[in-house]
Amino acid sequence: MSRPAEDGPMIYTVECSFADPVSEAEWNDFYSLDKLPALISVSGFHTSQRFKALRGGSPVYLALHSIDGPDVLTGEEYRRKGGGNFARWQQHITDWHRNLYDSLDPAPAVGNDEFLLTSANGPDSLIRLGHSPCAMRAVELEKFPERRWLTKVSRGLLPAIDHLPEDIHVYAPMTAQLTSGSGTGLADQGGS
């Protein structure tokens, strides 16, 4: 992989569902408590956060990572610390997708009092809700969806989820956003 010509942060997304209710809580603990801290310790990872979808139409789980570029994902440090260590749960992971997006902004830190909203059909639905979404373009890995827009919204300001346009996916944070180089590894969880 080679770095696209554009400068700026890149957002690495990992999406999946999990098909075994018996081991799902243990898998989530592993991912949130072991895997994310291991990933954020990899040189070139700057933020990591996990989310759970609140309605159908997308894989259940989403992880957003701000990274320096595609070379981070092919390096020995990534393989050693975080990449591909799902062997114990692999048989239960379904609908698994990975993408690397060029973005004008790093992945947003979504607080406990907020939701993450995404759309792959254009920014219009998010703009009509009063937001200025971050635009992303897929440049590596699956490259599908090719474009995505995302924003965060205060839980109190979001209309009823069932009344949102179908192209908007709604996610609740499962973890705080971990950040590299901070003492605690946790981003500010205040709302905005």
Image (tube, rainbow, N blue to C red):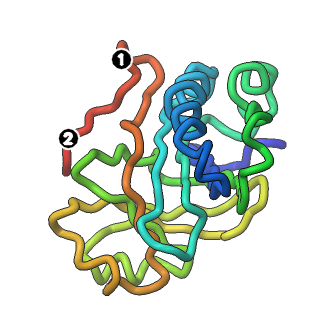
Direction front: furthest residue: 22
The label on residue 156 is none
- Is residue 182 left or right of 1 when viewed as pictured? left
Observer-nearest of 103 and 165: 165
Considering every residue shown, the one lying at the far top of the view is 183
Give the percent coordinates (x, y) of residue 35. Answer: 60, 29
Vertical comparison of 144 with 68: above or below: below
Q: Which residue is mark 1?
A: 184
For badge 1, the amino acid type reads Thr
Q: Is residue 122 left or right of residue 38?
A: left
Residue 89 picture quarter: top right
Q: Position of residue 185 (x, y in %)?
A: 40, 22
Question: Pointer 2: residues within 10 angstroms few (<14), some, or many (20+)?
Answer: few
Above or below: residue 149 compared with residue 33: below
Residue 138 vertical position relative to residue 42 in the rendered view, above or below: below
Q: Which residue is mark 2?
A: 190
The type of residue carrying mark 2 is Gly
Residue at horizontal 33 percent and vertical 68 percent from the top: 132
Q: Residue at x 48, y 67 (%)?
A: 149
- In the shown orientation, is residue 21 left or right of residue 72? left
Horizontal and vertical percent position of residue 138 = 67, 61
Which residue, as the protein is rendered here, is positioned at the far left?
156
For the N terminus, give its image quadrant. Answer: top right
For the residues bearing labels 1 and 2, Cβ distance under 8 angstroms: no
- At horizontal 78% and vertical 54% (from top left) the residue drawn is 141
Disc 2 is placed on an element classified as: loop
- The answer to which of 185 and 122 lies nearer the viewer is 185
Q: How far from the left and from the top, in percent, is residue 99?
A: 69, 55
Counting residues from the start of the chain, the first of labels 1 and 2 encountered is 1
